[in-house]
Image (cartoon, helix red, strand yellow):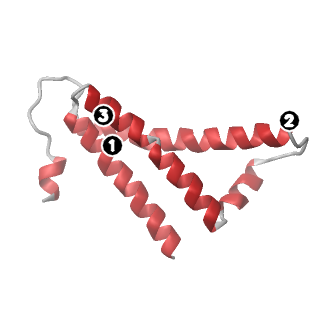
Amino acid sequence: MLDRYLNTSPTFYKWDKFWVGVIPAFIVPVLGLGGVFLITFLNAKYNHHEEFTAHMFLSTMKSQVAFMRISSLCCMLNGFVFFFFVKKDYNNASRGVMVTTMLFVLAILIKELL
C-alpha cells in the first residue's frame, strides 16, 4: 500500500517529484521554530527588558505543554506548502509534503507518549 503512495505517477511537470515536496516540508517547520524563537526573544528584550537565550528556549521546550503547542504550530505551517503544491497541480510533491508532515506528527506523538 505504501508503495502506491511513494511511487510517482506520470506527470508532465518537471518539478513534480516526491523529493521536491519532502525538502521544503523538512525546512518549513525548522524555520517556524526559528520564527517562534525570534518572536520570543524580541518580546523578552523589548517588552520585558530581560535576557532570553537559546538555552532558556530549549529548557522551555522540554515542558510538555510548550513542546506540544510549538511543534504543532510548526507542523501546521506545512499546510501552506501543501496547498501551494496542490494549487500548482504538483500531486507527487504534495504527497511528499503530506508524508513528511505525518512523520513529524508521529515523532511528536511518540515523544509525548514516552
Q: Earlier in the sequence, mark 3 or mark 2?
A: 3
Q: Earlier in the sequence, mark 3 or mark 1?
A: 3
Q: Amino acid at mark 2?
A: Tyr
Q: Amino acid at mark 3?
A: Val
Mark 2, residue position: 46
Residue displayed at 77% across by 37% down: 42
Residue 19 or residue 108, whichever sits in front: 108
Front label number (3 vs 2): 2
CA distance separating discs 2 and 1 = 36 Å
Q: Amino acid at mark 1?
A: Val
CA distance separating discs 3 and 1 = 9 Å
Give the residue at the far left of this rendering.
10
Q: Position of residue 112 (x, y in %)?
A: 52, 70
Q: Position of residue 68 (x, y in %)?
A: 56, 60
Q: Earlier in the sequence, mark 2 or mark 1?
A: 2
Q: Residues within 10 Å of mark 1 (few under 14, many from 20)?
A: many
CA distance separating discs 3 and 2 = 39 Å
Taking 114 as reference, is 36 left or right?
Answer: right
Residue displayed at 42% across by 41% down: 78
Mark 1, residue position: 97
Task: Name the element at disc 3.
Answer: helix
| Rendered image quadrant of residue 80 | top left
Taking 54 as reference, is 74 left or right?
Answer: left
Front label number (3 vs 1): 1
| Rendered image quadrant of residue 67 | bottom right
Taking 42 as reference, is 63 left or right?
Answer: left
Q: Residues within 10 Å of mark 2 (few under 14, many from 20)?
A: few
Residue displayed at 51% across by 53% down: 72
Mark 3, residue position: 20
Q: Position of residue 73 (x, y in %)?
A: 53, 48
**Count of numbered circles in the view:** 3
